[in-house]
Amino acid sequence: MLSILDEAKLRRVLTRMLDPEEFLSDFGIRALSRRLADAPYEFRYGGERFTVTYRPAESDSPLFGGNSNWRGPIWLPVNALIIRALLQSYTFYGDEFQVECPTGSGQLKTLMQIADDISARLISIFVPDANGHRPVHGGVRKLQDDPHWRDLVLFYEYFHGDNGAGIGASHQTGWTALVAALIALFGTISAEKLQHEGAAAIARTAPKVVPVSRSANSRRRHK
């Protein structure tokens, strides 16, 4: 096991990451803690004051062109890396390592179960709820209720940190298509397979997701 985090540090990180008041959303892991909405991070330098506040949707900063936000929303590539790390760690710690998920719930889960839980939250962004509404469509009534539109599921760039609505570019297949890999992975992998085969089981089970948007850009450049 080669890791920056030993067991004690990993437990401390997971306690905060799996806290619904901080990083854990109903739809995945947020990019920043929700606590920053009420208590922004503040930094003073050269007589100026800089703050970072939790923003679950669109950016309030002109950085990166003002159309991208890493200050609160849910991003598929970051969540996929977290899930992979949890599964990798599970191959070492096994079923003996358990933490509360969500934090404060009293429910103990293994790292494998936590990875599965986060994956299920991400997948739920695209799945109709009890009312037939998909979180990805947000408050757009035409997409939620019109039979000609409600099954048109787009691969948004990132997702609202509190309600799962799609935000940003709507055809971000380069990384949001990872949700298909998660569906395939957790539909076929098992705790027993991970314990027996180790990380190789993840590599063999997870399908290769071709970044369509990047491939298209590459073809245009070569032309």
Image: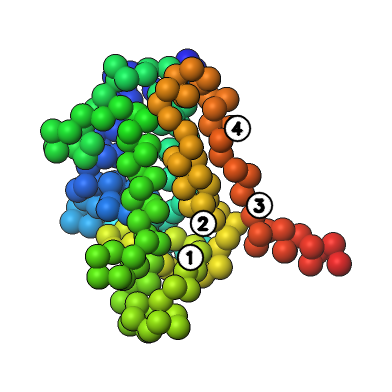
Quickly name the residue at label 3. Answer: 210
Quickly name the residue at label 1. Answer: 156
Looking at the rendered structure, the number of numbered marks drawn on it comes to 4
The amino acid beneath tag 2 is Thr
Place residue 213 in its image quadrant.
bottom right
Place residue 72 in its image quadrant.
bottom left
Q: Residues within 10 Å of mark 3 (few under 14, many from 20)?
A: few
The vertical placement of 60 against 178, above or below, is below
Q: CA distance from mark 2 to mark 4?
A: 21 Å
Q: Residues within 10 Å of mark 2 (few under 14, many from 20)?
A: many
Camera-side residue of 44 and 20: 20
Q: CA distance from mark 2 to mark 3?
A: 11 Å
Q: Secondary structure at mark 1?
A: loop
Camera-side residue of 63 and 162: 162
Residue sitting at x 21%, y 40%:
102
- Which of the two marks, 2 or 4, is nearer to us in this view? 4
Q: Position of residue 65 (x, y in %)?
A: 52, 68
Camera-side residue of 209 and 188: 188
Q: CA distance from mark 1 to mark 2?
A: 7 Å
The amino acid beneath tag 4 is Arg
Q: Position of residue 64 (x, y in %)?
A: 52, 63
Residue sitting at x 32%, y 54%:
27
Q: Earlier in the sequence, mark 2 or mark 3?
A: 2
The vertical placement of 11 against 160, above or below, is above
- 194 sits left or right of 8 in the view: right
Query: Cβ–Cβ below 8 Å for labels 1 and 4?
Result: no
The amino acid beneath tag 1 is Tyr
Mark linked to residue 204:
4
Quickly name the residue at label 2. Answer: 176
Q: Secondary structure at mark 4?
A: helix
